[in-house]
């Protein structure tokens, strides 16, 4: 799970997602409105939290997004499928009475 914080004097969590792409998209939306927005990205795992990055300007945002895209290109089809399936939410459907 990824957590995104905006840093404007104090840190405030603005997004939580299983998908790193969602976090990148959220940062992009904020940067469009505020070129001075700064972010902290944390990956939460069972063995503890890991700082994924500090984004201080639009150039660092672009570099982070490009690094993410390059990482995706190196994944195998099986790894990509596993990531997609992990992010799919299953909706339980109750039984219908006729």
Image: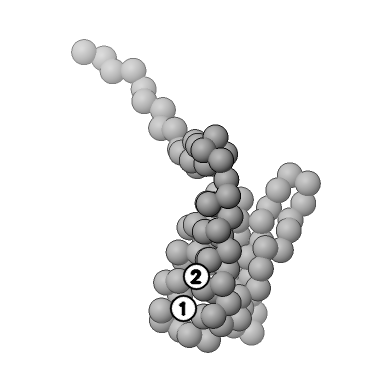
* Disc marking residue 31: 1
| Residue corresponding to mark 2 | 27
Image position of 7 with respect to 20: above or below: below
- Residue drawn at the location 56% of the way across and 72% of the way down: 63
Q: Which mark is residue 73?
A: none
**Frontmost residue, 78 versus 6:** 78
Q: Quadrant of the C terminus?
A: top left
Percent position of residue 89, x then y: 45, 38
Q: Secondary structure at mark 1?
A: helix
Measured along the vertical axis of the image, is residue 32 above or below residue 96? below
Q: Residue furthest left?
A: 98
Judge whether residue 4 can be spotted in this image: no
Instruction: Give x and y (percent) for residue 33.
Output: 41, 81
Does residue 55 show up?
Answer: yes
Q: How is the image coloured?
A: one colour
Q: Residues within 10 Å of mark 2 (few under 14, many from 20)?
A: many
Give how far across and how far down residue 56 sits, in percent. Answer: 60, 81
Q: Is mark 2 in CB contact (under 8 Å) with mark 1?
A: yes
Name the one closer to the observer, 3 or 60. 60
Residue at the (46%, 78%) spot, across then down: 31
- Establish if 9 lies above or below 84: below
């Amino acid at each position: 799970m990824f957590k995104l914080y905006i840093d404007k004097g104090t840190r405030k969590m603005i997004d939580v997602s299983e998908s790193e792409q969602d976090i990148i998209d959220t940062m992009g939306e904020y940067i469009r409105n505020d070129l001075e927005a700064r972010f902290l990205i944390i990956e939460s795992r069972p063995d503890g939290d890991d700082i994924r990055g500090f984004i201080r300007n639009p150039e660092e945002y672009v570099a982070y997004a490009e690094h993410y895209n390059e990482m995706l290109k190196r994944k195998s089809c099986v790894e990509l499928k596993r990531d997609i399936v992990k992010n799919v939410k299953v909706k339980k459907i109750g039984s219908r009475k006729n």
